[in-house]
């Protein structure tokens, strides 16, 4: 772990929108730009942000160039990835993080942005922010956007939700993100080190047998061994085949984690949960506590 602390944002700071994956439109970004400005921030909209190449926000070289400019700009205090979808893995090896490492800033997003979280944590050991993205902003603030605001401006994470009701504690560096993206990074230099960590997983729009395939793959790659805890967020809009797989997403995860000797917690408030996708810093130490009153808490100790 790198002990670098990213300074909280202040009114007047410059934050930038980035589109490393799927394309976005000015209309889709308007609510986020307005809300970010209401926080006192200067919003940088790079020229070429709204390019399109099929589903992607421009060609690989175009998206990489725009991201590189933001990584290198010392006056940008946070990079907010506009949306996920697919495409970040196509440009990750084109990016040079040397200037970013000299003057780190928050990298914000979830879903496909797990590629950037994983790469930054594995190669630099720097913290990032798993949080809602501009595509998710609406006309009014939500729990998700308010949590992002608080995290960016330095308020410590402290969330409580309903859990299984067993009493235990766990502490470790937080890592992980979208299960499909973690699976896609296996064997690459962006594959995260999970031992001793609190591993976050979530996913959207997947077949149940594929959830099982991914959990089996992570297990075979030793990514489920020696965890401080496994924290499961939204397993949203799961699909099944005509012949049912015979297990729910929760049952699949529990089966994969059987005998591994660490807490497995469901229902955590992150992932593809709309207004309830709360901001969680990754790459820093957090503490998980559960009690017999069926509540779980994650917070910065």
Image: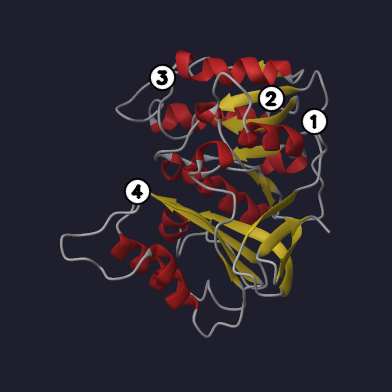
In the picture provided, is 82 more to the left or to the right than 241? right
Calculate the distance from the C-alpha at mark 4 to the C-alpha at mark 3: 26 Å
Q: Are marks 2 and 1 in contact (CB under 8 Å)?
A: yes
Task: Estimate the x, y position of residue 91 in percent, counting from the top left.
Answer: 46, 40
Secondary structure of the residue carrying tag 1 is loop
Name the residue tied to disc 2: 15
Provide residue 139's location: percent of width, then percent of height: 56, 18
Asked where in the image residue 106 lies, by quadrant, the reply is top right
Q: What element carries label 2?
A: strand
Determine whether, in the image, residue 207 is placed left or right of residue 142.
Answer: left
Label 1 or label 4, whichever lies nearer to me, is 4
Q: Which of marks 4 and 2 is nearer the N terminus?
A: 2
Look at discs 3 and 1 and give the one toward the viewer.
Answer: 1
Q: Name the residue under label 1.
A: 9
The residue wearing badge 4 is 205
Position of residue 253 measured from the top left corner of the image (x, y, whole percent): 45, 70
Q: Distance between the residues labelled 3 and 2?
A: 20 Å
Q: Which of marks 3 and 2 is in front?
A: 2
Q: Which residue shows up at 50% across the image and 43% down it?
A: 273
**Extreme bottom residue here?**
259
Labels 3 & 2 near each other (Cβ < 8 A): no
Q: Name the residue under label 3.
A: 51
- C-alpha distance separating marks 1 and 4: 34 Å
Q: Which residue is drawn at 62% across and 36% down?
A: 144
Q: Do the residues labelled 3 and 1 touch (CB within 8 Å)?
A: no
Q: In this view, does 181 lie above or below 37?
A: below
């Amino acid at each position: 772990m790198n002990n670098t602390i990213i300074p909280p944002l202040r009114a007047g700071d410059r934050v930038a929108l980035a589109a490393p994956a799927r394309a976005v439109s000015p209309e889709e970004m308007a609510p986020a730009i307005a809300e970010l400005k209401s926080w006192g921030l200067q919003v940088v909209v790079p020229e070429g942000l709204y390019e399109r190449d099929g589903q992607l926000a421009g060609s690989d070289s175009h998206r990489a160039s725009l991201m590189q400019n933001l990584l290198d700009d010392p006056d940008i205090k946070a990079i907010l990835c506009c949306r996920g979808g697919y495409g970040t893995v196509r440009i990750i090896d084109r990016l040079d993080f040397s200037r970013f490492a000299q003057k780190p800033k928050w990298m914000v997003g979830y879903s496909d942005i797990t590629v950037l979280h994983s790469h930054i944590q594995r190669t630099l050991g720097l913290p990032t922010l798993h949080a809602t993205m501009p595509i998710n902003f609406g006309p009014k603030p939500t729990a998700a956007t308010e949590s992002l605001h608080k995290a960016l401006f330095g308020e410590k994470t402290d969330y409580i939700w309903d859990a299984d009701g067993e009493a235990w504690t766990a502490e470790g560096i937080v890592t992980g993100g979208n299960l499909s993206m973690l699976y896609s990074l296996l064997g690459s230099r962006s594959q995260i080190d999970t031992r001793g960590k609190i591993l976050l997983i979530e996913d959207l729009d997947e077949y149940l047998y594929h959830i099982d395939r991914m959990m089996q793959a992570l297990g075979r790659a030793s990514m489920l061994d020696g965890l401080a805890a496994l924290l499961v967020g939204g397993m949203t809009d799961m699909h099944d085949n005509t012949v049912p797989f015979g297990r729910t997403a929760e049952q699949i995860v529990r089966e994969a984690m059987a005998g591994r000797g660490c807490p497995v917690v469901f229902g955590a408030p992150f992932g593809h949960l709309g207004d309830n996708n709360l901001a969680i810093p990754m790459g820093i130490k957090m503490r998980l506590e559960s009690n017999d009153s069926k509540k779980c808490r994650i917070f910065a100790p």
